[in-house]
Amino acid sequence: MIDYMAYSDMLKIQVDMCFPFEYGLYKKIGINNMSIVSEIGCGNAYFLNKLRSAFSTPKYFGYDISSELIKKAMLDKGNKGIVLNLGSIEDMREKADVILLRLIMHQIQDRYKFLKQVTERINPNGIIIVVDPLDEKFQIFPALPRFMIRLGSLRNILSPDQASRQISGLLLDEMRTLNFKLFEQEGYFIPSLLPGYKKKYYDYMKATNNMLGYSSKEIIEINAWYSNSSAYAQIGLFIYVFKKVN
């Protein structure tokens, strides 16, 4: 059973950690010149709200299959003006200039079917943005064995059996088959050595751990990591921007 309050907290921390690293690309590709931006898997809409604060011109739509997260998004007065929907790509009725798939592709079982539906809902000159983990950049020192077991259990719950986290190369082939080319790409990692980021990682690990319910043994382990002056953590992500081949 997922604790959706902890899930929402984790999403907010993760966005605050990542957005400064993604902002430049969104600016470069001209989000503020678009009319409609739709995010599939928007969760609590915290990322959409952050994007809207930076680029206010488009109309924003968000979809998520979690009734708990969409309810939280709808109750958040800060999301007023974002059109929020319980559902996924098959429920999308608008044609978008940007479809954002942020940290959901590794949870999709039939990627090709899903991506085909996405490509059918993008405007002719629109772009599809995929953001997903680079697990080879993931590091925690010293090791947190209890936390990693919890993280593994959480990933098993959130991702179906046929989903894969190693998709960066697969996506290129699948999108090429769908007549979309890679227009822009970036990869980045976020070190805990940045000012304030060790605390962000600490809060992120606690919220992630608590998604499966509070457990004092794991929290003791995380607290010890935070108290260790030599402790280090990092996560990595890639961003692909696809456009239709004319």
Image (cartoon, grey):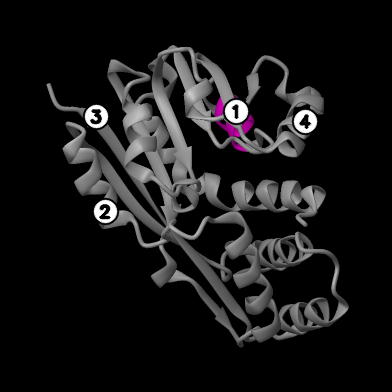
The location of residue 196, given as percent across then percent down, is: 67, 62
Is disc 1 placed on a helix, strand or loop? Answer: loop
Disc 3 residue type (three-letter): Lys
117 displayed left or right of 62: left
Disc 1 residue type (three-letter): Gly
What residue is rendered at 62% in x and 35% in y? 65
Disc 4 residue type (three-letter): Lys
Report how far apart the C-alphas of labels 3 and 2 lie in the structure: 17 Å
239 displayed left or right of 60: left
Q: Are marks 1 and 2 in contact (CB under 8 Å)?
A: no
Is disc 2 placed on a helix, strand or loop? Answer: helix
Q: Which mark is residue 71?
A: 4
Few, some or many residues within 10 Å of mark 3 (<14, 14–19, 20+)? many
Nearest to N terminus: mark 4 or mark 1? 4
Q: Which residue is mark 2?
A: 170
Q: Which residue is mark 3?
A: 243
Q: What range is drawn magenta here?
A: 47-52
Is disc 4 placed on a helix, strand or loop? Answer: helix
